Image: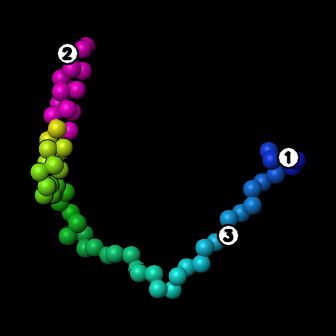
Amino acid sequence: MPDTESTPAPAPEPSPEPSHAPSPARHDAQDVRGGEIVLRRRRSRVVFIAGLAAFVLVMLIAALWR
């Protein structure tokens, strides 16, 4: 049985880069700035509003707890 604590693990072999890999997406800084939240489905809106309400509720409880 080999001593695994003093024996280093073998280095992983580098994976070959595919020549047909797409280049990373490039976005203009003006296009990605803004932080607009898009909630198209009703479920997404409900979860988002519930999260905001839960945050406010936790902050109120924390303020009253002191």
On the image, numbered disc 1 is attached to which residue?
Answer: 3
On the image, numbered disc 2 is attached to which residue?
Answer: 64
Kindly indicate the quadrant of the structure image that contains residue 35.
bottom left
17 displayed left or right of 27 = right
38 displayed left or right of 13 = left
Q: Are marks 2 and 1 in contact (CB under 8 Å)?
A: no
- What residue appears at the point 52 percent right and 82 percent down from the top-left corner? 18
Question: Looking at the image, is mark 3 or mark 2 earlier in the sequence?
Answer: 3
- Identity of the amino acid at label 1? Asp
If the image is split into quadrants, where does the C terminus sit? top left
28 vs 49, nearest the viewer: 49
Q: Position of residue 25 (x, y in %)?
A: 34, 75
| Residue 11 tag number | none
The correct choice, above or below, for 47 with respect to 59 in the image is below
Alpha carbon separation for disc pair 2 and 1 = 57 Å
- What residue appears at the point 17 percent right and 30 percent down from the top-left corner? 56
Q: Which residues are magenta?
A: 51-66
What secondary structure is marked by label 3? Answer: loop
On the image, numbered disc 3 is attached to which residue?
Answer: 13
Q: Position of residue 41 (x, y in %)?
A: 13, 55
Q: Position of residue 24 (x, y in %)?
A: 39, 75
Between disc 3 and disc 2, the foreground one is 3
What secondary structure is marked by label 2? Answer: helix
Q: Position of residue 8 (x, y in %)?
A: 78, 54
- Identity of the amino acid at label 2? Leu
Q: Is residue 58 magenta?
A: yes
Q: Are marks 3 and 2 in contact (CB under 8 Å)?
A: no
